[in-house]
Image (cartoon, rainbow, N blue to C red):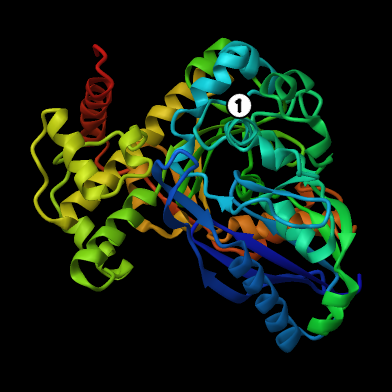
Amino acid sequence: MSEKKLFCVDLGASGGKCFVGTFKKSGDFTMDEVHRFDHGGTSFYLADRSGAVSERSYWDDTAIYDNIIKGLHAYRRERGSSVDAIGIDTWGADGAFMSADGEMLGKVHTYRDHRLDAMCAEVIAKLGEKQIYSITGVHFQPFNVSNQLLWFVTRRPELLKLAERFLPVPTLFNFYLSGATAVDSSWASVTQLMDAATHEWSETIMSALGVPERVMPQIVEPGTIIGKLRPELAEAIGISRADVVAVGAHDTASAFAAAPIDDPDHALIISSGTWSLVGRLIPKPITSEAAMVTGISNEGGIGNTRFLKNCMGTWIVQELLRVWEAEDGKRMSWREVDTIAPAAAAFSAFIDPDDKRFYNPANMESAIREFITETGQQQPVGRGTILRVVYESLALKYRMVNEQIVPICGTPTKVVHIVGGGSGNLLLNQFTANALNLPVHAGPKEATAVGNLMVQAMAKGIIGSMAEAQPFIRKTFAVQTFMPQDVAAWDESYQKFGEICCRAKGASC
């Protein structure tokens, strides 16, 4: 095999990274970071046509694109002009409408934008929960693209008339690089617009929402070559016209694909980062009423289905650090977080990480303290204790989700795999092992990029399947194991956690 070099762009909700993956003549694989950057949503306070002022949150797609180009320049400087393929993965929501002349019709809203707060109800009113779930297998979340497109159709009809195409976020950047407009099925599957059985846009749902099918991109399977780098751009950067590959563009699809699991029937996978995506890999979607009632989604994988639940992740901690930075004038380092949280008192209080008040509050600490007061608990003292409350509650929530998934799948969980950026959080890894009383294997940390590169390798014929990727993953990336500790104390706390979650919902326990 001749040496092949692949370029990966991994875009998360708070930053982006560019990697080069090299499949060497010797049969070895290496992955190296060549560029990293921060980005995030920016809030504006703008009046609509009625004069009402609202907060609007937008992504800076120009800055993100500029950093992708900087990553390609870094690649050229470090690795030369020859690149075989490029693949982009992103978070699983948002997009932009484009005119026939390539003009963007408005800014790219972020998925936490408050315009979506009540849109689930409007979508449900069009068809009903059961019919939508039976078609898509996707649970109802404010950020779903179904909500976003219904908002656009009903609130911006004048712009819809000008729209030539809707470009999901990964497709938007593929379009900038190559002119390609397709989207892969892993990303399309989470929109609540794709038929989970056929991998096509659902005519039933699109018609009910009033979204014209003409604007929707073609859905392709992960590993499809959808274009080439524009010749003008390749010349400007000084690199070859690489193939542009539709990878598992939803970052969770790529992350799950990189989990080094031996037995999918008994492995719980947690893609840990801003969000915690907790679930199993299954052969086909499960769209039963039991799955719908428990809020589990069926998301398209790479040759399989991700049967999972979207749980809040380290977003809560990130927002705490943002609030404290505003108070102190400096950012608390992760080293300090990793010092003060373990030293704090255990099980002093609990929160339900998925309570709506934690989705996008103005002040995360105030939201946490409000939850604790309303559920009759003692307020935590000190920042370390607040952080520990969050981490303990996240681990206990993972246990709760596992207990919802197991009876529907019909097989017990015997091991937990944590992948993604959160797999480097030693405290949360240990808490997860304790809470579930199961061994936890943590890594790869850059699982999304690994999955991205392996799908590119499939597209280029380097490997024949994701199963063939496993030896490369196991050989290249270290995995750390955490065994359960203090199980009795965690079992007792889980009972209290469940009661607090019930109390917060106003339900009897």
Q: Is residue 435 above or below residue 77?
A: above
In x, y percent, where is residue 124? 56, 17
Q: Quadrant of the N terminus?
A: bottom right
Please state which of residues 168 and 157 is positioned toward the viewer in this rendering. 157
Kindly identify which residue carries mark 1.
138
Q: Quadrant of residue 336?
A: bottom left
Q: Quadrant of residue 163?
A: top right
* Percent x, y of residue 192: 64, 29
Give the position of the C terminus as an image quadrant. top left
Quarter-of-image position of residue 80: bottom right
Q: Residue at x 62, y 36 (%)?
A: 152
| x, y percent for residue 469 | 75, 54
Q: Nearer the viewer, residue 372 or 114?
A: 114
At mark 1, the secondary structure is loop
Q: Nearer the viewer, residue 211 or 503?
A: 211
Measured along the vertical axis of the image, is residue 185 above or below residue 450? Answer: above
Decide if residue 450 is in sight here. Answer: yes
Front-most of residues 48 and 447? 48
